[in-house]
Image: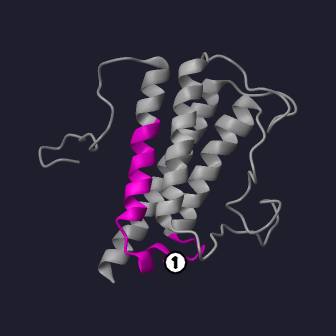
Amino acid sequence: MSEDGTVGRGPGEPPTTGAGGAERWIGYLDWVRADVRGGVLALSPEERRTTRLASGWTPVELLSHVLHMEQRWFVWGFLGEPVADPWGDWDVADPEEPDGRWHVAADVSAEDLARRLDAVAERTRTVLRGHRLDEHASLGGRFTQDPPTLEWICFHVLTEYARHAGHLDVVVELARRS
């Protein structure tokens, strides 16, 4: 909230005017994705791999998670295309396993993950520009029945990014205080 009591827009937020539909979704996804990407890359290499929360995840693991999450929803989910290791952000084959958690190999850097996220982002933009928002996801990839619409997927992915951006804000604040 600003000093005059009004709620301010965050830097990089898409304008209040302009194209709606797919271009609006592209703008908002780009905005929150850049926020998460930038937040992780702004940390030192040591801080990127330091956990500060009881749940145990690190910022680099969060970056890996969001790139896999976005790919799971738009490529594997909506397009129904196979993806190599869709759950590659987890240390178990099934993320529903109770002891599973996010994991990033020691030889994978945040910069590597950021480059991969950039490629996923470009693919998402292509999907959004090439399909109607009311189009249902393909069967056979992530979905075997009742596939959601592309717009539903956009809402879901945006909310997941927003939650994780908030989580990362807390972690960055804790890192700066130490």
- In screen coordinates, is 83 left or right of 105? right
Give coordinates of residue 12: x percent, y percent. Answer: 29, 40
- In screen coordinates, is 16 left or right of 45? left
Residue 16 magenta? no
Of residue 75 and residue 92, the one placed in the foreground of this image is 75
Q: Residue at x 75, y 50 (%)?
A: 84
The C terminus is located in which quarter?
Answer: bottom left
Q: Name the residue under label 1.
A: 51
Residue type at mark 1: give it: Thr
Q: Quadrant of residue 30?
A: top left
Q: How many neighbours does mark 1 have within 10 angstroms: few (below 14), some (14-19), or many (20 or more)? A: some
Q: How is the image coloured?
A: one colour
Q: Is residue 50 above or below residue 43?
A: below
Residue farthest bottom in this picture: 178
Of residue 138 and residue 149, the one placed in the foreground of this image is 138
Give the magenta-colored segment's residue range: 29-58
Q: Which residue is drawn at 52% across and 40% down?
A: 121
Residue 39 magenta? yes
Give coordinates of residue 112: x percent, y percent. Answer: 52, 61
Q: Residue at x 56, y 34 (%)?
A: 124
Is there any visible trace of residue 159 in the rendered image?
no
- In screen coordinates, is 156 left or right of 34? right
